[in-house]
Image (spheres, rainbow, N blue to C red):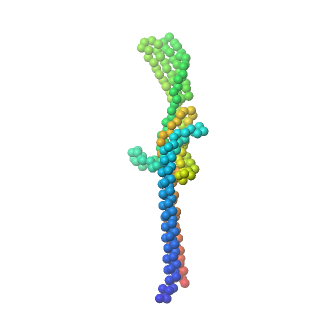
């Protein structure tokens, strides 16, 4: 009976610490669930805004919102065990070129050349039957800088939007329905550290028991 009375306060203290730990752990679990729900809701709202967006030209840069979804893996990605992160369909439209040029004439051929910003075309025509024509076209490289940027946290959705940017020299650009994994700009928040808390509770309880044994 005396031993029970001696250990009674320590046991009560351990129970109190454990109960407090369970309560805090429950709060952390509820907070994590709330954050996950808010993230899901925000990503859904962001997707609605992204679907309504189209390619816009801002300060010489073509821009469009990307849809934040988990991208399905095709057969190649599955075979290579790759996880798609960003997919951006981009169409570069070269404007048609219409021009009048002088042809160089000889007794047997006519030759003309057009050197444009996007291609070089050469035409040689035989002036005698069967009037064969040789057409040579060299398309110049189309250079484009494609980027993916995380915008600031939106006041309406609470998540960071993903913006696709394309910079080209002179041509029109149409950005298709780009997709980005949510982890690119809106990764899931890590565990708040409940395991470490319970480890601390266990160490504290062990210390209490040790003090009781020493006393």
Toward the bottom, the furthest residue is 2
Q: Residue at x 51, y 66 (%)?
A: 27
**As rendered, which of 176 and 144 lies closer to the eye?**
176
Q: Is residue 34 above or below residue 201?
A: above
Query: Could you tell me residue 195's position as x and y percent?
Result: 49, 66
Q: Residue at x 56, y 36 (%)?
A: 168
Q: Residue at x 52, y 74 (%)?
A: 17
Quadrant assignment, res 60: top right
The count of marks equals: 0
| 100 relative position to 79: left or right | right
Toward the top, the furthest residue is 107
Query: Could you tell me residue 120's position as x and y percent?
Result: 52, 25
- Confirm whether residue 181 shows in the render: no
- Confirm whether residue 28 shows in the render: yes
Q: Is residue 77 above or below residue 196?
A: above
Q: Is residue 173 above or below residue 134?
A: below
**As rendered, which of 42 and 131 lies closer to the eye?**
42
Q: Residue at x 55, y 84 (%)?
A: 215
Query: Could you tell me residue 31's position as x and y percent?
Result: 51, 62
Q: Is residue 157 above or below residue 134?
A: below
């Amino acid at each position: 009976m005396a031993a029970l009375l001696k250990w009674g306060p320590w046991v009560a203290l351990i129970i109190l610490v454990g109960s407090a730990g369970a309560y805090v752990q429950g709060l952390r679990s509820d907070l994590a669930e709330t954050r996950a729900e808010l993230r899901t809701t925000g990503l859904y709202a962001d997707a609605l805004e992204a679907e309504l967006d189209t390619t816009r030209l801002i300060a010489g840069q073509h821009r469009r919102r990307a849809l934040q979804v988990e991208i399905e893996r095709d057969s190649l990605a599955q075979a290579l065990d790759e996880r798609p992160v960003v997919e951006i369909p981009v169409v570069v439209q070269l404007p048609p070129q219409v021009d009048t040029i002088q042809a160089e004439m000889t007794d047997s051929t006519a030759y003309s050349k057009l050197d444009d910003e996007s291609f070089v075309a050469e035409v040689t025509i035989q002036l005698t039957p069967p009037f064969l024509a040789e057409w040579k076209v060299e398309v110049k490289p189309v250079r484009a800088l494609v980027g993916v940027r995380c915008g600031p946290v939106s006041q309406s959705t609470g998540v960071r939007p993903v913006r696709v940017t394309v910079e080209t020299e002179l041509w029109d650009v149409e950005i298709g329905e780009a997709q980005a994994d949510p982890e690119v700009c809106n990764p899931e928040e890590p565990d708040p550290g409940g395991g470490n808390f319970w480890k601390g509770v266990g160490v504290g309880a062990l210390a209490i028991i040790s003090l009781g044994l020493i006393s």
